[in-house]
Image: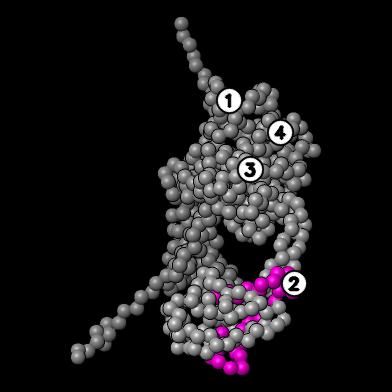
Amino acid sequence: MSASITNVINVQLLEGGALAARDNFNVVTIITSQQDGILSSDNRFAIYSELAPIAEDFGTSSAIYDYATAFFGTSPNPTSAGGYLITGYWRAGDESVAATAATLTGTQLSESAVVSQLQSIQDGSFDIDVDGVTENITGLDFRFVSTLQGAVDLIDTALTGASASISDQKVVITSDTTGAASLLTNVIAGATGTYVGDILTLSVGSGAVLVQGAAAAVLSAETKLEAVTELKSLTNFKGGMFIDNPTDVESKDLAEWAQANNTLMYDVFSDATNLAIDPTNVVWDIKLSSLTNYRMLYSVANNRKMAASYMARTHAVNFNAINSALTMHLKTLSVAAEDYTQTQINAAKAVGLDIYTTIKLTPVVLTSGANDFVDNRYNLLAYVDAVQTDSFNLLKGTATKIGQTTPDVNKILDQWEKTTRNFVTAGVFAPGTWSSPDYFGDVDTFNRSIEANGYYGLAGLLSEQPQSDREARKSPVIQGAVKLKGAVHSADFIINVNK
């Protein structure tokens, strides 16, 4: 036998761990109070990438189907860029919750391994309390079973006050009763026979999950703010709207929530007072409060499906594509355009309301930048997430470490520049002239970089870093500046005519 090559050469692989994914900014939700057996407080959301399953789940006469039709009828929509629609649930009224049965659920089992162990047992046994009564399960002859289902069928037959089944490769014991008196225990060894509780992972310490029954209950109605908060904790949507029209107070609450949670919320207003520059007008109040993540639309017909289509068209950008960033100005929606006077158009623009009307018989969105433009908010939220995620992945994906040295700090800066170039390619940022008085570093270098690249980055000096930050293993501050590409929404012509 020859000597191993490891006597001379040893090789060690340093592989990076799994990396984080950027948030999907094309995941949006339409929130409904409709249940129809699909949505409830126990099942807050469902995911869809096409219309047909919504018809199956809710019916074609449902409000959610009507709104989803406007959503999927918009082209392109989030499904064109890796996104999808979530139907979210809002408990608008009291909800009755049925009584539940107690369950004991084991861990996932390898069928071949478990069956081979059981086949050597002809006197299997265990004890379990069902609704306060101990059942002594004995004489389980597994010698002739060839599947896990066969073994569970033997247990099911032996139980009198409960049933046994398989779910997701797990053995589940369920009490035959429901309510607060529906009770189970983990299984324990009986007085005789061969104990099989450990093999089936139903004993204490085996990973089994025991859930006792609960009585029927009535859950009280919740606010829209409570609903959207709960839904956000379950699924990371980036755009949302309620089918039900929020009150002014609810709109302000949702606007504050959207700003704090880096999420765009869409709402439709229809009253003439919403066009007024007046502190009592919630639209103007939201604009004055700089709650730019609340996207406000105006429909004189109170067509709230406008928000569904507008949201679908907005959240349709693939930031990895070239020149994919968009403006909603002059875009086409899948709802009926409405007629407005020039006075209404000017008022909507002044207070921060986008409208959907026609120009030369062509339907178009007319946007207002009074509360910023929606594409700015959408793009910058996506950019911040990309910088956070990509920088995290640099630290996480380095098999050794990013050191507190100038070359390694420059790796962090390089990653920021790479991420930012991605958004330059997408058309979010672009080379241009820096018009703000704020800058950092050498002003000439700063301006040249903005004019040539659309961005400029600078890492702080390690020699100037506070010792406390170094001991806390912090990087020097990375400063960046980006120039938004903007969009042309209108143009003026001056034409000289000579006779």
Q: Which residues are magenta?
A: 171-197
- The front one of 471 and 80 is 80
Residue positioned 75% across, 64% down in the render:
216
Circle 1 is placed at which residue position? 358
Residue positioned 55% across, 53% down in the render:
47
Could you tell whether 36 is left or right of 321 in the image?
A: right
Q: Residue 372: horizontal and vertical position, in percent?
A: 62, 40
Q: Amino acid at mark 1?
A: Thr
Q: CA distance from mark 3 to mark 4?
A: 23 Å
Q: Amino acid at mark 2?
A: Ala
Q: Residue 464: horizontal and vertical position, in percent?
A: 55, 66
Mark 3 surroundings within 10 Å by alpha-carbon count, few (fewer than 14), some (14 through 19), many (20 or more) = some
Which mark is first along the chain, 1 or 4? 4
Relative to residue 276, is residue 71 depicted above or below?
below
Q: Amino acid at mark 4?
A: Ser
Which mark is first along the chain, 3 or 1? 3
Count the marks. Answer: 4
Asked whether the residues under the numbered discs 1 and 2 touch, taking CB atoms below 8 Å apart as contact, a structural biologist would say: no
Residue positioned 19% across, 89% down in the render:
2
Where disc 3 sits, the SS reads: loop
Circle 3 is placed at which residue position? 62
Residue positioned 24% across, 87% down in the render:
4
- Residue farthest to the left, as pictured: 2
Which mark is first along the chain, 3 or 2? 3
Mark 1 surroundings within 10 Å by alpha-carbon count, few (fewer than 14), some (14 through 19), many (20 or more) = some
**In the image, residue 195 lies in the stretch drawn in magenta:** yes
Circle 2 is placed at which residue position? 180
Q: CA distance from mark 2 to mark 3?
A: 35 Å
Mark 2 surroundings within 10 Å by alpha-carbon count, few (fewer than 14), some (14 through 19), many (20 or more) = some
Q: Amino acid at mark 3?
A: Ser
- Give residue 270's mark: 4
